[in-house]
Amino acid sequence: METNLNSGAKPLDPGRFGEFGGRYIPETLMNAVLEVEEGYRYYKDDPEFQAEVTKMLNEYAGRPSLLTYAPRLTEKLGGAKIYLKREDLNHTGSHKINNVIGQALLAKRLGKTRLIAETGAGQHGVATATVAAYLGMDCDVYMGREDTKRQALNVYRMKLLGATVHPVDSGTATLKDAVNAAMREWTRNVADTHYLIGSVMGPAPFPEMVRDFQSIISKEARAQILEAEGRLPSAVIACVGGGSNAMGAFYNFIPDEGVRLIGCEAAGRGADTFETAATITTGSVGIFHGMKSLFCQDENGQIAPVYSISAGLDYPGIGPEHAMLNASGRAEYVPVTDDEAVDAFELLSRTEGIIPAIESAHAVAHAVKIAGEFGPDENIIINISGRGDKDVAAIGRYRGEDLYDE
């Protein structure tokens, strides 16, 4: 399937999504970011580059991913037919490979020999390490110390693939701190290094670029559901941390006003508690990690600690395009607690034989709540952004089982 990096609407001001987005970075990084922007603007219109990305997505990552009807889950919930967009079937087990392939091939075109990345759940780190190995590039991955414990299996996978994993002990030792460390490293080594940001966040052009590489999800899903059902979905549901899988799942449905776009945030132990990562539900406008967006902040405007059972959603901000979609009302964002996500993790496993990532289980949990609002002739697409192998031991411990993977 051909990849089209130019589909859909563009921000009126490149790098801005309404009041959100922009480029708030130190001068030491400006030339590197401008080099990325110039290269991307050129190569996104280059047929040879697009063909190279498409070839690697199809022949290495395994695209197009399946759109799978979930009959037993549909029957159990009542209401709309449930379809699953199977990003868990991609090589490396998640949607992350889509963006990594695009950015890594761009980095090669820009003469870079080394990739650095941040990771929370480890899936972006694994995807980056995988493609670095395939393309013969050096790779360093920054990961919060707390997340290295929660995702020990993925840490070993990255090392097995030849990457150096750097545990980060500062702050809360989670995803935001890994981003900080990766940005500091980039300022020291801009000549040969590309910072392969894993979500629709950071300074322009990263939110737009990552969105474009991930938009293959909704391009495929839109064609697949029309072939399967002869109509568009009533809703597309995806989990949201920084927001790359959700932007990929939403993007080509944005012009379809009858399709509800629903992002599911990690509420942790409750959006009304301090142990939450539900940014849009609880956050406010601020500037962090090179962008203007919504962030969880304290009364002094400092970035607040966040919590989720899901390392991949444990981030105190959200991509600027999501902030714009929320402000305009085009997309809706809902909080999902740990308990709800774990219940959904088990439900999908037992009804369909598909173990989702705990991140994706947040989206399944909300589908459980709303499926009955629709008629049997309607359908819902849930983006299964990753597979749950990495989470089995953690969920087992959550349920009181004596399981350890470290």
Image: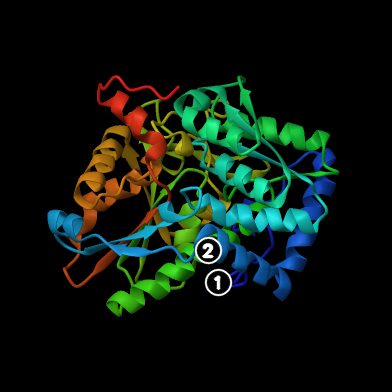
Q: What's the mark number on residue 215?
A: 2
The residue sitting at 16% across, 68% down in the picture is: 376
The residue sitting at 62% across, 58% down in the picture is: 208
Looking at the picture, which amino acid does disc 2 mark?
Ser
Residue 185 horizontal/vertical position (percent): 75, 33
Would you name the residue on which mark 1 appears?
8
The residue sitting at 25% across, 45% down in the picture is: 349
Viewer-nearest residue: 52 or 3: 52
Tag 2 secondary structure: loop
Quadrant in the rendering for residue 357 = top left
Q: What's the mark number on residue 246?
A: none
Residue 242 as seen in the image, left or right of residue 192: left
Residue 17 horizontal/vertical position (percent): 60, 58
Viewer-nearest residue: 242 or 98: 98
Q: Earlier in the sequence, mark 2 or mark 1?
A: 1
Say if residue 185 shows up in the picture: yes
In three-dimensional space, the C-alpha distance between marks 2 and 1, rounded to whole angstroms, equals 9 Å
Residue 184 as seen in the image, left or right of residue 368: right
Q: Count neighbours of disc 1 (C-alpha within 10 A) and say few if under 14, some if 14 to 19, many if 20 or more.
A: few
Give the answer, above or below, for where 137 lies relative to 102: above
Viewer-side label of 2, 1: 2
Give the answer, above or below, for where 266 lies relative to 211: above
Residue 21 horizontal/vertical position (percent): 63, 51
Say if residue 271 shows up in the picture: no
Q: Which image quadrant: the C terminus?
A: top left
Report if the CB atoms under discs 2 and 1 are less than 8 Å apart: yes
- Number of numbered callouts drawn: 2
Tag 1 secondary structure: loop
Quadrant in the rendering for residue 269 = top left
Viewer-nearest residue: 346 or 374: 346
Residue 165 horizontal/vertical position (percent): 63, 30
Looking at the picture, which amino acid does disc 1 mark?
Gly
